[in-house]
């Protein structure tokens, strides 16, 4: 977040860093300034124009309304308000216009949702979109720094022939924990009654809200399988999608749509083994797309593979980008 703010076009004249009492007093750099982290209280937001939240849903629920009450516009990177009909859920390249309806809070979508809708929107605009089936290969950093540390420790233990230990993954919210090193976990977040994980639930309903305006829309059929893989940064996704206009759609047309799409870099040349990979996506704001090919059975269906840095476009960059678009549209104030 701090790096994205250091590099933003937003006209920032001062920055406050707010956290819990545990972090209050810590000093962090912002450009050439040293800023002391303050404990968050309601009046922390007095005189603040833009508040970026990314400290868990509970903190957002408690303080985002306080910030709005004091005149700030909030971009919230948690799921606290994503399904609230009063709160726009925004990926600027996809549904920028939803920003006009904000009442003080704008929600940043889940990282896996963001990179998928960035990849699919140019295709939808050209050929329509009926159905999406996505499988994700999510980096460990999506579960936080302690999970990243667990990946490193387990990897070293495995190489040293020692038993691996797991205390974090697949999720703090569940009872059992499994190693992620040299493994794949088909669980991200807790399971709902229907056997889908909460991460899968998010991808399904957030995609519907962003692309069809309603979290339960039947206009686009969406389903998801979300897995954790032993990669530190950047999520990968295999996406099967069915288009409306089967007659005019083809691989070249889909590649052309992607080649000119905002926030997308097309890396699609199998003859030269060119395709998106996490090691090439880390540190970039872009979503990399490749492996575009027709389905072998359905004449209106295609596949693609996308990769994006889950900490940037998946979180910090999309949040700051929303703020930049709010400023551009003169919406950085209460409606
Ligand atoms: O694990 C991943 O790879 C992505 C999960 C990201 C995440 C982690 C904790 C809480 C929330 C949340 O706000 O619900 C979210 C979110 O959906 O943004």
Image (cartoon, grey):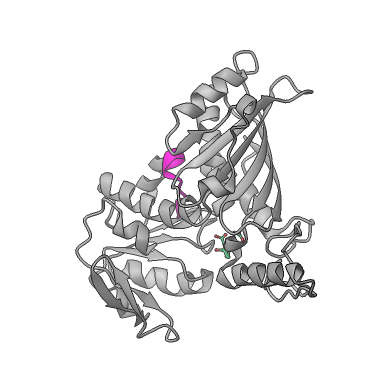
Q: Residue furthest top?
A: 247
Number of marks in the rendered image: 0
- The quadrant in which residue 23 appears is bottom left
91 above or below 4?
Answer: above
Magenta: main secondary structure equals: loop
Let me know if residue 227 appears in the view. Answer: yes
**Splitting the image into 4 quarters, where does residue 39 fall?**
bottom left
In the image: residue 43, left or right of residue 280? left
Left or right of residue 9: residue 249: right
Which quarter of the rendered picture does the N terminus lie within? bottom left
Task: Residue at the far left: name it.
Answer: 13
194 or 33, nearer to the observer = 33
The image shows residue 297 at horizontal and vertical percentages of 79, 23
Q: Is residue 231 magenta?
A: no
Q: Identify the residue shown where x is 57% and y is 26%.
A: 128
Specify whether residue 94 is painted magenta: yes
Task: Report ligand 1 position as a quadrant.
Answer: bottom right
Identified at 54% across, 53% down, the residue is 111
Q: Is 36 above or below relative to 206?
A: below
Question: For this view, does 140 lie left or right of residue 46?
Answer: right
Relative height, residue 305 to residue 278 (above, below): above
**In the rendering, at what x and y percent does residue 272 appear?**
61, 27
Question: Which residue is at 69% across, 70% downward?
Answer: 156
What's the magenta region?
Answer: 86-95
- The image shows residue 99 at horizontal and vertical percentages of 38, 47
Q: Is residue 215 visible?
A: no
Quarter in which the C terminus is drawn: bottom left
Viewer-proximal residue, 152 or 33?
A: 152
């Amino acid at each position: 977040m701090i790096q994205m703010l250091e590099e933003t076009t937003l006209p920032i004249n001062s920055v406050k860093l707010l956290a819990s009492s545990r972090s209050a007093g810590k000093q962090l750099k912002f450009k050439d300034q040293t800023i002391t982290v303050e404990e968050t209280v309601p009046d922390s937001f007095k005189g603040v124009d833009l508040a970026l939240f990314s400290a868990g849903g509970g903190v957002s629920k408690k303080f985002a309304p306080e910030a709005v009450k004091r005149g700030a516009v909030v971009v919230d990177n948690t799921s606290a308000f994503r399904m609230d009909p009063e709160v726009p859920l925004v990926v600027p390249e996809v549904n920028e216009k939803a920003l006009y309806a904000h009442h003080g809070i704008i929600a940043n979508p889940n990282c896996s949702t963001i990179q998928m809708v960035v990849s699919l929107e140019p295709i939808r605009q050209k050929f329509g979109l009926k159905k999406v089936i996505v499988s994700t290969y999510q980096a460990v950093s999506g579960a936080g720094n302690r999970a990243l540390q667990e990946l490193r420790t387990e990897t070293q233990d495995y190489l040293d022939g020692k038993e691996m230990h797991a205390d974090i993954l697949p999720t703090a919210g569940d009872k059992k924990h499994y190693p992620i090193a040299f493994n794949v976990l088909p669980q991200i977040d807790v399971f709902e009654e229907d056997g889908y994980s909460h991460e899968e639930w998010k991808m399904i309903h957030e995609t519907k809200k962003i692309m069809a305006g309603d979290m339960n829309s039947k206009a686009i059929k969406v389903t998801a399988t979300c897995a954790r893989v032993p990669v530190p940064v950047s999520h990968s996704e295999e996406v099967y999608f069915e288009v409306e206009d089967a007659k005019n759609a083809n691989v070249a047309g889909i590649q052309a749509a992607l080649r000119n799409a905002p926030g997308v870099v097309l890396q699609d040349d199998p003859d030269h083994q060119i395709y998106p990979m996490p090691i090439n996506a880390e540190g970039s704001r872009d979503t990399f797309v490749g492996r575009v090919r027709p389905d072998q059975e359905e004449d209106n269906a295609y596949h693609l593979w996308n990769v994006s840095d889950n900490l940037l476009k998946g979180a910090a960059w999309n949040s700051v980008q929303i703020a930049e678009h709010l400023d551009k549209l003169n919406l950085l104030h209460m409606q």
